[in-house]
Image: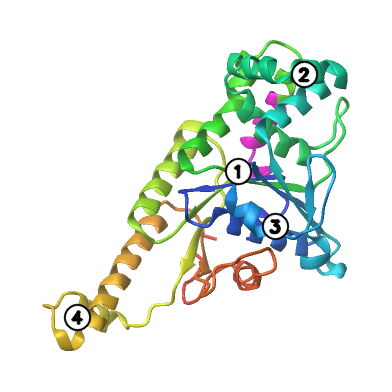
Amino acid sequence: MNRLVGRRLLYVTGKGGVGKSTVALSIGRYLAEKGQRVLVCAPQGSGGLLRLIQGAPQQGEPAIASLRDSLVSPEAGGCLDAMLIDPAEAVRGYIEMVLGSPRVAAALFQPKIAEGFLRGLPGLESWALLGRAWHACRAGGPDRPAGDYDVAIFDAPATGSGTDILRVPGILSELAPAGRLRSDAVACHTMLVDPLQSAVVPVAILEELPVTETLELITTVREDLKQPLGPLIINRTVPEKLSPAVREKLAGSAVDDAFGPLQREARRESLRLGYRKRLAACGLPLIELPNLEIPPTNYQNLTPLIEALDQNTGPGYRLAGS
């Protein structure tokens, strides 16, 4: 996990249902405990993050949920906030910032005009989502102030849509006309391809479809997008109960009623070990997070995951590649 400390933008993605939001918020708390100012953000409608931050005090427009007092120890010096981004509102806010006129932006974003405007600029909603995260953590420069956070963690949509969003800044940096939109897209794209500033963090669980989609994601990010990857996080792991010798004997033996439960467990363990081996072959550092007997229902139930991140590994498995 230390290789994520100091990066400004972390893009957490994976197949739907693998616990991306839980992982994103856990990473956020881990970094906040290291003294960083952290914003975790996701598109509006992200049920995972919405569920986890319910009950947290919110302020501002768009509303930012402050998790600082509940989760981060005062002596750490960091902070942890969360925000759900409405794409249309993000576009309106961006246009307002570019035009420097709330009245003109409000006029543009009357419902019928906004609908046609968004359809006429493909990729703008994706840019507004990712751009909001970049804006929160951007470095300062002669023509722009620094963002309010040391790091933004983007809880991305599921794998296919997630990689589509990552393409947008590069496309806009080449195709947008000279001006604020293009300069911002260039700065965001520069951050996304810089291994010292950003990382795509894949999340998987040890099942066939999540493993297959994660490996496809890693290939796309490496070979097509050419963006840096962080550690690969394997969520919801369980410790193996059987020794290698017993597991091999039971998994390969004929079904026996007397040993049926043990045989089923041996086969499940063999499958999980095979999935783990496939993930390890991609060459990324692996971090395992434990399966929680009671799934987290809010931002206060993440302590076992934070402890696992702090140890760099889940139970019974050595961190690979770091």
Name the kind of residue labelled 2 in the image.
Arg
Give the foreground label among 2 and 4. Answer: 2
Q: Circle 4 is placed at which residue position? A: 249
Comparing marks 4 and 3, which lies closer to the viewer?
A: 3
* Spatial CA span between label 3 and label 1: 13 Å
Which one is in front, 86 or 38?
A: 86
Residues packed near mark 3 inside 10 Å, few (<14), some (14 to 19) or many (20 plus): many
Q: Position of residue 20 (x, y in %)?
A: 55, 53
- Could you tell me the amino acid type at mark 4? Lys
Determine if the magenta segment contains residue 8: no
Q: Residues within 10 Å of mark 4 (few under 14, many from 20)?
A: few
Query: Could one spot residue 29 in this view of the protein?
Result: yes
Marks 4 & 3, CB-CB < 8 Å contact: no
**Residue range highlighted in magenta:** 185-199
Q: What residue is pinned by disc 2?
A: 180
Q: Nearer the viewer, mark 2 or mark 1?
A: 1
Residue 45 is tagged as 1
State the SS at label 3.
helix
Judge left or right: residue 224 versus residue 129: left
Look at mark 3 in the image and give the residue it sits on: 53
Q: Name the residue rendered at 63%, 23% in the picture.
A: 124
Q: Seen in the image, is 77 located left or right of residue 137? A: right
Between the C-alphas of marks 2 and 1, the distance is: 29 Å
User: 10 Å neighbourhood of mark 2: few (<14), some, or many (≥20)?
Assistant: few
| Residue depicted at x 61% and y 65% | 297
What residue sits 77% from the left and 41% below the top?
A: 137
